[in-house]
Image (cartoon, grey):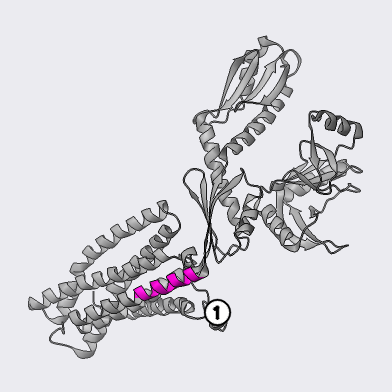
């Protein structure tokens, strides 16, 4: 156990040196970090909201809205099913609508009710696979009406999926560069926590979050009589919708879009080639480019409207087929608003409305105070531990203090290398790690002391001490690691920060206590050949 072949020594040096190199940027200022050679790590650990200052938002997802959207999709599917019936099997119906959390329609011939129910049940898609629970319920509601509703299990699934999708889409919206500094995570059934360290403008975040980002391309119905009639009655013809342009023009559009925003592959802020005004460029994916090319080829001379959140941004005329699969949106944009819109389109539309429930702003001064308090606590803890180890174990205490310093370097190196976020509870985790590392050394040293008092020679006492303490320390660290895993899985924000540093500290503590300190002991044994241990 006290053998250290060259490869093992090289591994110890490699881990220690690289840990120190990754930790180094944390003690340098920005100018000093810029002077670090490009082949060396130069990124410090990310500081959490409580250390850096910033904005914390609590959001709620209107998951019931996503259920309504799914009901509208179910309505369109039901209409398509009914329109496939022909001849004697034709199902004639009226008043197809979404009402009271269900899709309803009235049969013109009640004798077709069994046929209609069977046809509607074909839309059932079992939850979780062919053997899963049904997703819809179809029944006769009286007065010749057929009712189609989601099962409670399907409603629960839709609402949970709405929250999951909202989290996945808000991340790219708020952190388009993918730096990982903005935290977006679910909290409870329909709540989401957003933490943006370093952010000073909560209104900008709220503006980006609350924009639905629903992008569609709809053909314009250029029938003035139909538009006038729709405006007079307030009810456009079936298959048409009325929308207002940002320029004030009222347009009658085909309700079904020719293409939707989920087919946009990329979007970016740019400038109009003629007037140099800010615009939003977009590029379709392969399917979108094909559909857009077909639609523009078949509708030359017609106008099509680009709608964002039900507002017509522009309605150009199709002069020729647009086959390149790209275009741009123009409007009264500033560079900043165009950039925000491009980010929203790139991330995709939210599946449901998001409401801001609370806003908390942490000032940078408070964050700096937390850093200084945490650093002071760590230094005091390290000094007290060092004094105790030196008094209690002499030279072996020096070995323990040296391994403690390397331990802290490895923790900060791991935080920097993994891109993890350091929070105030994370600093508490580091302080706890110092205590855990010392505890491991104390157990080992006490075992060595007992073996030495029993008359064993120094080499035998040290080897036996490490062997007998190993299982006890591993058991303790494994149970702590399991606890850290639970905290990380079930916790949020600061709790996760504590769990991360605690888990990293467990691995580094085992390494420094059982590898590094033992190596120090072996070097001393070989150099001095003692007859008695100085402890």
Q: Is residue 1 left or right of residue 414?
A: left
Q: Position of residue 384 (x, y in %)?
A: 27, 77
Q: Nearer the viewer, residue 4 or 470?
A: 470
Q: Position of residue 475 (x, y in %)?
A: 25, 60
Residue at 84% x, 33% y is 231
SS type, badge 1: helix
Q: Which residue is mark 1?
A: 30
- Asked if 27 appears above or below 172 in the picture, the reply is below
Residue 181, quarter of the rendered image? bottom right
Q: Main secondary structure of the magenta part?
A: helix
Residue at 61% x, 62% y is 201
Query: In the displayed image of the protein, which residue is found farthest to the bottom?
Result: 528
Badge 1: how crowded within 10 Å, few (<14), some, or many (20+)? few
Residue 372, quarter of the rendered image? bottom left
- Asked if 341 appears above or below 467 in the picture, the reply is above
Q: Position of residue 474 (x, y in %)?
A: 26, 63
Which image quadrant: the C terminus? bottom left
The verdict on residue 440 being magenta is no
- Count of numbered tags: 1
Is residue 41 visible in this depiction of the protein?
Answer: yes
Instruction: Specify the segment rendered in magenta.
Output: 365-378
Q: Position of residue 373 (x, y in %)?
A: 39, 72
The verdict on residue 375 being magenta is yes
Q: Nearer the viewer, residue 511 or 428?
A: 428
Is residue 8 visible in this depiction of the protein?
Answer: no
Residue at 15% x, 83% y is 533
Which image quadrant: the N terminus? bottom left
Query: In the displayed image of the protein, which residue is found farthest to the top?
Result: 111
Q: Nearer the viewer, residue 183 or 40?
A: 183
């Amino acid at each position: 156990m006290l053998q250290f072949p060259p490869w093992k020594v090289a591994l110890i040096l490699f881990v220690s040196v690289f840990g120190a190199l990754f930790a180094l940027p944390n003690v340098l200022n920005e100018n000093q970090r810029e002077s670090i050679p490009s082949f060396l790590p130069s990124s410090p650990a990310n500081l959490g909201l409580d250390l850096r200052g910033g904005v914390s938002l609590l959001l709620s997802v209107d998951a019931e809205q996503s259920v309504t959207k799914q009901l509208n999709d179910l309505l369109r599917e039901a209409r398509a099913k009914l329109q496939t019936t022909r001849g004697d099997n034709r199902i004639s119906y009226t008043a197809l609508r979404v009402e009271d959390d269900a899709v309803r329609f009235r049969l013109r011939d009640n004798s077709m009710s069994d046929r209609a129910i069977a046809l509607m049940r074909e839309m059932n898609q079992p939850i979780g696979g062919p053997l899963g629970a049904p997703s819809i319920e179809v029944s006769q509601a009286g007065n010749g009406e057929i009712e189609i509703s989601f099962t409670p299990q399907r409603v629960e699934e839709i609402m949970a999926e709405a929250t999951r999708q909202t989290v996945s889409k808000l991340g790219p919206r708020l952190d388009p560069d993918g730096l990982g500094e903005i935290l977006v995570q679910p909290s409870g059934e329909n709540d989401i926590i957003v933490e943006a360290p370093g952010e000073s403008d909560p209104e900008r975040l709220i503006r980006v979050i609350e924009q639905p980002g629903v992008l569609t391309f709809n053909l314009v119905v250029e029938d003035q009589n139909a538009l006038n009639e729709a405006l007079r009655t307030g009810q456009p013809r079936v298959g048409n919708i009325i929308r207002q342009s940002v320029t004030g023009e009222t347009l009658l559009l085909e309700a079904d879009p020719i293409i939707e925003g989920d087919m946009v592959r990329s979007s970016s802020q740019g400038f109009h080639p003629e007037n140099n005004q800010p615009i939003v460029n977009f590029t379709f994916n392969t399917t979108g480019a094909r559909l857009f090319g077909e639609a523009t080829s078949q509708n030359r001379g017609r106008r099509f409207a680009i709608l964002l959140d039900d507002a017509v941004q522009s309605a150009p005329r199709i002069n020729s087929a647009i086959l390149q699969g790209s275009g741009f949106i123009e409007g009264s944009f500033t560079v900043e608003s165009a950039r925000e819109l491009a980010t929203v389109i790139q991330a995709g539309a939210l599946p449901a409305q998001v409401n801001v429930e609370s806003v908390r702003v942490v000032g940078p001064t408070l964050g700096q105070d937390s850093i200084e308090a945490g650093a002071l606590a760590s230094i005091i803890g390290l000094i007290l531990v060092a004094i105790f180890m030196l008094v209690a174990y002499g030279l072996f205490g020096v070995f323990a203090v040296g391994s403690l310093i390397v331990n802290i370097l490895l923790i900060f190196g791991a935080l920097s290398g993994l891109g993890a976020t350091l929070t105030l509870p994370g600093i508490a985790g580091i302080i706890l790690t110092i205590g855990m590392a010392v505890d491991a050394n104390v157990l080992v040293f006490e075992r060595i002391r007992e073996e030495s008092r029993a008359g064993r020679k120094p080499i035998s006492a040290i080897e036996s001490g490490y062997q007998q303490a190993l299982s006890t320390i591993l058991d303790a660290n494994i149970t702590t690691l399991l606890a850290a895993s639970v905290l990380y899985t079930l916790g949020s924000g600061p709790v996760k920060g504590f769990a991360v540093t605690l888990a990293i500290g467990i691995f580094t503590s085992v390494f420094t206590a059982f590898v590094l300190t033992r190596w120090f002991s072996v070097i001393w044994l070989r150099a001095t050949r003692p007859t008695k241990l100085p402890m």
